[in-house]
Image (cartoon, grey):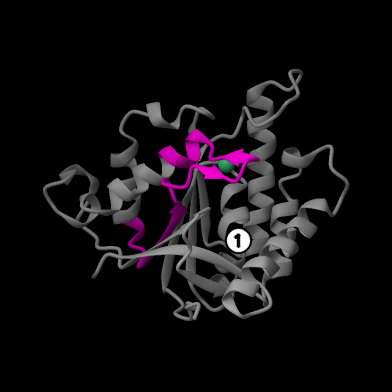
Amino acid sequence: MAELVTVVPSVALAVYAHPDDADVGCGGTLALWAARGSEVHLVVCTDGGRGTRDVGTPPEDLAARRSEELAAAAQIVGLHSHRVLGAADGELDRRAGFVAELVALVRSLQPDVVLGHDPTAVFFGQDYFNHRDHRAAGWALLDALSPSAALPHYFPEAGPPHQVSTVYLSGTLEPDVWVDISETVEVKASAVECHRSQFADAEAGWAGDAVRRRAAEEGRRAGVAHAEGFRRLRLGG
Ligand SMILES: [Zn+2]
């Protein structure tokens, strides 16, 4: 029987590689928790500047556009805060001090729940393999959460230790819990549609339809109308 997560965290932090990733991966969950009173923060690691096939769009122009798209989506989802670390798109694994940066954020925001990419997910059928920034962000986040953020002798300059209790990894091949997003699937669809630069050639509404279809698939696995699936890690605390 699929396990549904019903606990609403008081503070949640989502850490994702690109400006659209959180909305695609867990936008329904973030919107649900925000609506129920959670303080939800989002950290976007790269500027997303290379996410186009259009050679005529300079990366800095695309990064600026994606920053606006992100701000619009954040408002729709109801985020308490969002910030862009600004790493070069595609080079997240080369960002110096990245784990320390995440440790400092975790220690200052003190989330009880953290969400991010499942870095072990590589091949999604024959059509897609996971972006290197997603893998890099996922591994760095896990390294930051345990043991680093929780123990005082790791990165002592990054603030007092903080123990995150639960991690939810999206974009996973091995979901073991689901969040019922039936109430917020339309919010998620609207948020994903804000990232227009990522499907500029598609017809309007395509992204929203893809969101509804995917959420309904996960909903069937979870026994509800619409869901998001996660790999859950319980770290204690
Ligand atoms: Zn991405």
Q: Nearer the viewer, residue 125 or 92?
A: 125
Q: To which residue does mark 1 refer?
A: 27
Start-end of magenta stretch = 108-136
User: In percent of the image, x 42 and y 46: which residue is there?
Assistant: 119
Q: Residue furthest top?
A: 56
Does 221 sit above or below residue 127? below
Disc count in the image?
Answer: 1
> Is residue 93 left or right of 223 when viewed as pictured?
left
> Is residue 205 left or right of 104 when viewed as pictured?
right
Q: Is residue 141 visible?
A: yes
The magenta stretch spans residue 128:
yes
Local crowd at mark 1 within 10 Å, few (<14), some, or many (≥20)?
many
Ligand 1's image quarter is top right
Percent position of residue 191, x then y: 69, 57
Q: Amino acid at mark 1?
A: Gly
Percent position of residue 198, x then y: 72, 40
